[in-house]
Amino acid sequence: MATPSPFGPFELKRGDSDKQQTWGGHKRPNAGNHVTTLQEALVAVDIPLSIIDGEFGPGTEQAVKMFQWCLTAHPYRRFNQALVTDTRNVTQAVNGRVDSQTASELERWLDQSYASTGDLVRLDSALLDHMEVGDGFRVLSHASVRDNDVVVASAAADLITTANTKAGERSVQLVLNQAFRVNGVPVSGAVVTPATRSQHLIGHAIDCNIVDGNNWNNSRTFAAGRQTDGATNLISDLKTAGYRWGGDFSNPDTPHFDKRLNPYGDAYGFKFFFNQRTITNNLPIPLKNLE
Amino acid sequence: MALLRSLITLGLALLTSACAQADTTHTPLAEAWSAGKAIVVTIDATPSDTDETYGDFAYYLNDFATNAGDDWAFFELDSQQTNPDIPIELNVTAPPYSVLFIKAGTPQGYLYPGPILEPQVYDFVQRRFEGKEVPEYLYQFGPDEVRVEMDEESGLFKVGVGP
Ligand SMILES: [Zn+2]
């Protein structure tokens, strides 16, 4: 049995109901509003939940999963208007059940006045010796973001730092055209339908050209097989390091590199929601230390 | 997305459909041309949700369209459908996601054969069409030059190889 918590001495799960006095999958004789209390807590830490009704349905289960994802995916928490790094390391299954750790963590977040956020970070491209932003690079319109900032998911920041290091080793320069992408475009400007499940939308991809001396290795260079050795070697390095190169796609996309998350998995969906919300709601984005 | 690798040559079908129309000189395409607008035509740009190549293509195209201003007009051409609004006879090979750039009064148009995945390509064409200086490195992003003729009688745009 779980440790007693504001959410009752049960492992709350889908199917539980305050009205039915069913908690932890069993009808209980005692009175309580455990599901309602759970739902109020999830909303208090800014997990999306449309109805507080005391019924543990699919929406509540999804909200619990999103909270569990936040616990384990990254250490960032919102506190007042700022962002803090939670020093507590938690390993938590994302299963939608309010087990004892989920309950105690939710209680701790309430005590600390934490609120949920995504894992976007800013990298100062001026500190990257072998990477720069190109003329066509669009700086994100966001209160935290400065001119040289490249925004990516914290979990994929190593794609940028590794590419920078390897570019140095291969004596080439990377010119970045895009990293994180805001979902959608102004309707008036949309010519074609944007993709909705790209790795860019969660901050796990970059588009860049590999500049080797005066040679810009671009899509047409690769299509013609005229890429330089420096480019070939750098791409090989990045693939060896575990990243995907778009030049290997059935539809080649040679400027594209990513650290792929299954676009149909929960982790992609949750990261998409939180990272896009960070931009929409102008929530703080921390600057990652590159020193 | 299964992007066809085989090249598609557009021509006769579009020519036929264009000529079948009674008044093709007042199509939206012809009007944009007469107004001196720079015209961007995407060819067989089938959307895809998860394809990164499509996603990048769509992003850079939409970003350019959003910022290009009123002197630019955008059209989509589906080579499998007859569209009297876009009477173009393409006598050059254009794989899916190719982009055609044309403008009245310029020495040549441009065809990028396949998806544009770098914003520098748009930058290059915009500078050329607007008579601005082109930095040396941008020439490495230049699309293929094409010859563009508009038949005043039929309103048909004929696009051929070479400037
Ligand atoms: Zn990309």
Image (cartoon, rainbow, N blue to C red):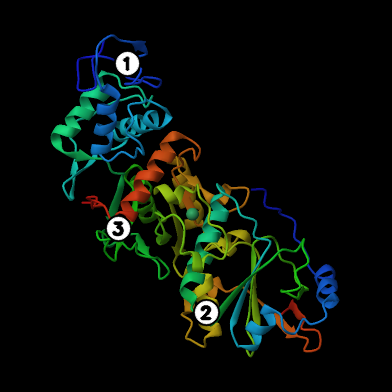
Q: Nearer the viewer, mark 2 or mark 3?
A: 2
Residue A50 coordinates in the image, percent (x, y): 36, 39
User: Local crowd at mark 2 within 10 Å, few (<14), some, or many (≥20)?
Assistant: some
Chain under numbered label 2:
B
Q: Amino acid at mark 3?
A: Leu
Q: Amino acid at mark 2?
A: Gln
Residue A202 coordinates in the image, percent (x, y): 41, 47
Chain under numbered label 3:
A
Q: Secondary structure at mark 1?
A: loop
Q: Secondary structure at mark 2?
A: helix
User: Local crowd at mark 3 within 10 Å, few (<14), some, or many (≥20)?
Assistant: some
User: Local crowd at mark 1 within 10 Å, few (<14), some, or many (≥20)?
Assistant: some
Q: Which residue is mark 2?
A: B126
Q: Which residue is mark 1?
A: A21
When the figure is inspected, residue B67 is found, relative to residue A148, above or below; the finding is: below
Residue A253 in sight in this render: no
Quadrant showing the N terminus of chain A: top left
Q: Secondary structure at mark 3?
A: loop
Is the residue marked 2 within 8 Å of ligand 1, measured from its CB? Answer: no
Residue at the image point whose x is 32% and y is 26% from the top: A54
Question: Alpha carbon of mark 2 to alpha carbon of mark 3: how far?
Answer: 30 Å
Q: Are marks 1 and 3 in contact (CB under 8 Å)?
A: no
Chain under numbered label 1:
A
Q: Which residue is mark 3?
A: A128
Give the number of the disc on residue A220: none
Q: Nearer the viewer, mark 2 or mark 1?
A: 1
Give the tally of numbered discs.
3
